[in-house]
């Protein structure tokens, strides 16, 4: 009985690998937007709330892939997540403290620009 289960699980694993590969290739071919989260991001996970991680991914999915820049307002983000502007501001503060984003206004009362910052594994800085 265990041998049949092992065979089934190997077949299932092969099917899941193919499914993932096809999904990835289809999205690339259709030029759907994507946002890479690099391996070194794991160093930030233990220090961030789930909301801040979700917001970081949100910024990444809405950012210009060339500049890492997103123009969404706190109000717009608040509506998307169904959370208060105060909560969104708190998540933004977490991301800024981790140096994962920088948010600036280029002109007085203008739209805020959120820039995704390069990050490294803290133990590898300077290598």
Image (tube, rainbow, N blue to C red):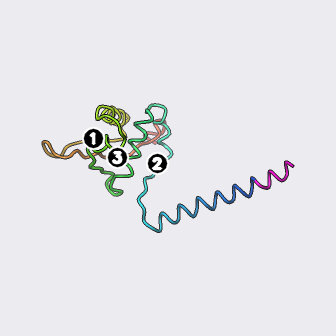
Residue positioned 75% across, 55% down in the render: 10
Real-space Cα separation, disc 2 to disc 1, in angstroms: 23 Å
Real-space Cα separation, disc 3 to disc 1, in angstroms: 16 Å
Mark 2, secondary structure of its residue: loop
Quarter where residue 67 is shown = bottom left
List x then y, in percent, for residue 94: 36, 33
Q: Range of the magenta residues?
A: 1-8
Residue 116, disc: 3
Mark 3, secondary structure of its residue: strand
Mark 2 or mark 1: name the one nearer the start of the chain: 2
Mark 3 or mark 1: name the one nearer the start of the chain: 1
Residue named by callout 1: 74
Going by the picture, which residue comes out furthest to the bottom?
29
Residue positioned 48% across, 37% down in the render: 43
Taking the magenta stretch, the answer to whether it contains residue 63 is no
Q: How many marks?
A: 3
* Residue nearest the viewer, comparing 65 with 71: 71
Left or right relative to 126: residue 92 = left
Q: Residues within 10 Å of mark 3 (few under 14, many from 20)?
A: many
Taking the magenta stretch, the answer to whether it contains residue 7 is yes
Q: Residues within 10 Å of mark 2 (few under 14, many from 20)?
A: few
Mark 1, secondary structure of its residue: helix
Residue positioned 69% across, 55% down in the render: 13
List x then y, in percent, for residue 112: 22, 44
Quarter where residue 119 is shown = top left
Query: Mark 2 or mark 1, which is nearer to you?
Result: 1
Residue positioned 42% across, 41% down in the render: 54
Q: Is residue 93 above or below residue 101?
A: above
Residue named by callout 2: 37
């Amino acid at each position: 009985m265990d041998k049949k289960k092992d065979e089934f699980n190997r077949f299932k694993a092969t099917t899941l690998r193919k499914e993932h590969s096809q999904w990835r290739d289809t999205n690339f071919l259709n030029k759907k937007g994507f946002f890479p989260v690099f391996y070194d991001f794991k160093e930030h996970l233990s220090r961030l709330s789930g909301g801040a991680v979700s917001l970081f991914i949100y910024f990444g999915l809405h950012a210009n892939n060339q500049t890492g820049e997103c123009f969404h307002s706190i109000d717009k983000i608040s509506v998307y997540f169904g959370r208060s502007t105060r909560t969104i501001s708190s998540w933004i503060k977490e991301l800024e403290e981790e140096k994962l984003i920088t948010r600036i206004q280029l002109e007085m009362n203008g739209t805020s620009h959120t820039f995704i910052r390069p990050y490294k594994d803290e133990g590898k800085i300077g290598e």
